[in-house]
Image (cartoon, rainbow, N blue to C red):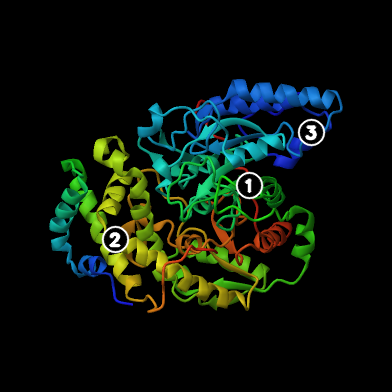
């Protein structure tokens, strides 16, 4: 299973590039980041990227979305 | 015929029910006492009190008892719920400012309906992290809930009010919700029992959603028997919650027998031991000894599961909140807002990948459960941190309290396994709990292990010190 291009692009960001990514995404979503929120949002987005990198690299090739049942 | 009215009524739910049923007290007396405790709550556990509704129900129960009409097993027992549960005629605030202007709920949440049908009397709503996103219950709008064992410390979250109310003697039974650990962490930090059932076991209808694919609801109580009884009373399919389809499988009648049968117990190592405070590992050893557990059981992929749950949470939650994040972002609790904004900005493909890892990790867990009936792990990395404490030390590094309190609970809720959080019996010391984790749909195994530990005096909810007078 090829990695999703949007996921690949996100995972490829380094922390310095997260701000530009966030601005582009916010504009696309019609979302304004007030100044009070910017630093915290970027910090959390960078953390999401680092966390996503850990499990995305370990997905089985056959892993497909399912309606999850415990 | 009056109920104890001190700030420290520490009877079990079933003791309260028996006192009413056998005429030692009345439903009205118990309800008045619970309302008085709620109004003088020293822990900031309550955010609302429902006196009129509660007294009307209590008086109806007393009339039924006086006329020898049948009543439910919890007849007259006061209870309270996290303020994300719908209560007819009340606004469901879910810990937020944003929802304070929302229309009142028309119906009670299913879980509230079922406890009420069993005779329990709803007396109030309880504090929580905003929109259930947090492990601390330091709510920007309603203030922090204080730990009854030490008022300078947090109660844990996000169901902090629910845990503190039971721990602090305000009410014997509460409801909370658990998406990443929000029943298990506060139960651990406040020294009470909590049950996070299998995903889909109890209806979430009428509980304000946080992350629908991960949300659970469950009870807090002071004994295993109370936990099992409340759980049984809430079971059964609900057409209004598409995940809740399973017929009720009551555990209380067979719990003693299951507890007397052999149990194969393992202690999770690896991820579940990394970074834990020494006293957390020491208490886990006490529990493991009591259950003759095999140590160092590996659950492969737990760290990745935690990371996946960590990512899935804000991205899925942001779907629900995007309109308000656009329109009024500054009305959110800052600690919640910035994570939701980050979730909104992250690509959806991250959430899809996080969801795809769930069956992978579920498969690993099923494999481990071929050799064990229950698994043990710490419920939190540490005893309760101080209110306002931003960081703590894990493995020699300063890390965020908010982001790490649920490190051991997140992988388990990610795959929806049932867990009892049980308080290790260490009177006079800060409470610490353990997770007793069972295979999916096997709540009776976790409850039975907890009962066995409770009988042996290894786990117990114990009375906290009296709060200072005037608090």
Which of discs 1 and 2 lies nearer the camera? The answer is 2
Mark-to-mark CA distance, 3 and 2: 51 Å
Question: Quick one: SS at disc 3?
Answer: loop
- Dot label at residue B462: 1
Q: Percent position (x, y) of residue B281?
A: 51, 66
- The residue under label 3 is B71
Q: Is residue A14 above or below residue B148?
A: below
Left or right side of B81 for B354: left
Q: Percent position (x, y) of residue B139?
A: 39, 38
Q: Are marks 1 and 2 in contact (CB under 8 Å)?
A: no
Quadrant in which the N terminus of chain B appears: top right
Mark-to-mark CA distance, 1 and 2: 39 Å
Residue in front for this viewpoint, B98 or B155 = B98
Which residue is pictured at 63% across the width and 37% down the height?
A: B113
Question: Quick one: SS at disc 2?
Answer: helix
Name the chain letter of the residue that bears numbered label 3: B
- Dot label at residue B405: none
Question: Quick one: SS at disc 1?
Answer: loop
Residue in front for this viewpoint, B432 or B162 = B162
Q: Which residue is the extreme one toward the front? A: B239
Residue in front for this viewpoint, B334 or B153 = B334
Left or right side of A2 for B173: right
The part of the image, by quadrant, that contains residue B209 is top left
- The residue under label 2 is A48
Name the chain letter of the residue that bears numbered label 1: B
Which residue is pictured at 74% across the width and 72% down the height?
A: B262
Name the chain letter of the residue that bears numbered label 2: A
Which of discs 1 and 3 lies nearer the camera? The answer is 3
């Amino acid at each position: 299973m090829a990695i999703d291009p949007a996921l690949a692009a996100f995972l490829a960001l380094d922390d310095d590039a997260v701000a530009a990514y966030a601005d582009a995404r916010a504009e696309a979503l019609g979302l304004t980041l007030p100044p009070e929120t910017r630093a915290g949002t970027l910090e959390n987005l960078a953390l999401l990227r680092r966390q996503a990198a850990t499990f995305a690299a370990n997905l089985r090739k056959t892993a497909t979305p399912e309606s999850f049942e415990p | 015929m009056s109920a104890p009215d001190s700030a420290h009524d520490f009877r079990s739910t079933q003791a309260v029910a028996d006192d009413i049923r056998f005429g030692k007290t009345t439903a009205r007396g118990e309800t008045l006492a619970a309302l008085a405790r709620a109004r003088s709550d020293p822990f900031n556990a309550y955010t609302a009190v429902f006196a009129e509704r509660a007294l009307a129900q209590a008086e109806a129960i007393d009339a039924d008892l006086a006329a020898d009409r049948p009543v439910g097993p919890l007849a007259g027992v006061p209870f309270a719920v996290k303020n994300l549960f719908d209560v007819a005629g009340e606004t469901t605030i879910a810990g937020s400012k944003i929802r304070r202007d929302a229309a009142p709920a028309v119906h009670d949440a299913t879980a509230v309906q079922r406890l009420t049908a069993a005779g329990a009397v709803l007396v109030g709503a309880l504090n929580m992290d905003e929109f259930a996103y947090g492990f601390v219950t330091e709510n920007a709008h309603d203030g922090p809930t204080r730990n009854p064992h030490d008022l300078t410390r947090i109660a844990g979250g996000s169901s902090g009010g629910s845990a503190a109310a039971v721990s602090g003697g305000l009410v014997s039974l509460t409801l909370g919700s658990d998406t990443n650990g929000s029943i298990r962490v506060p139960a651990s930090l406040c020294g009470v029992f909590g049950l996070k059932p299998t995903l889909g076991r109890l209806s979430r209808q009428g509980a304000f959603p946080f992350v629908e694919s991960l949300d659970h609801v469950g009870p807090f109580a002071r004994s295993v028997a109370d936990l099992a009884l409340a759980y049984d009373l809430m079971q059964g399919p609900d057409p209004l919650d598409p995940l809740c389809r399973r017929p009720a499988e009551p555990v209380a009648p067979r719990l003693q027998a299951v507890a007397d049968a052999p149990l194969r117990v393992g202690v999770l190592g690896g991820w579940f031991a990394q970074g834990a405070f020494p006293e957390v590992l020491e208490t886990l050893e006490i529990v493991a000894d009591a259950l003759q557990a095999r140590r160092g059981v590996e659950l492969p992929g737990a760290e990745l599961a935690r990371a996946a749950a960590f990512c899935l949470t804000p991205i899925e939650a942001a779907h629900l909140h995007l309109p308000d994040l656009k329109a009024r972002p500054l009305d959110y609790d800052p600690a919640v807002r910035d994570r939701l904004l980050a979730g909104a900005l992250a690509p959806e493909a991250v959430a899809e990948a996080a969801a795809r890892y769930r069956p992978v990790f579920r498969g690993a867990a099923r494999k481990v459960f071929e050799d064990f009936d229950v698994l043990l792990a710490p419920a939190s990395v540490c005893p309760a941190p101080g209110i306002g404490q931003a960081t703590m030390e894990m493995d020699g590094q300063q890390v965020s309290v908010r982001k790490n309190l649920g490190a051991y609970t997140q992988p388990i809720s990610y795959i929806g396994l049932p867990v009892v959080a049980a308080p290790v019996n260490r009177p006079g010391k800060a409470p610490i709990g353990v997770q007793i984790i069972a295979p999916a749909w096997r709540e009776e195994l976790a409850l039975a292990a907890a009962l066995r530990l409770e009988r042996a005096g290894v786990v117990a909810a114990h009375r906290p010190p009296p709060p200072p007078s005037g608090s």
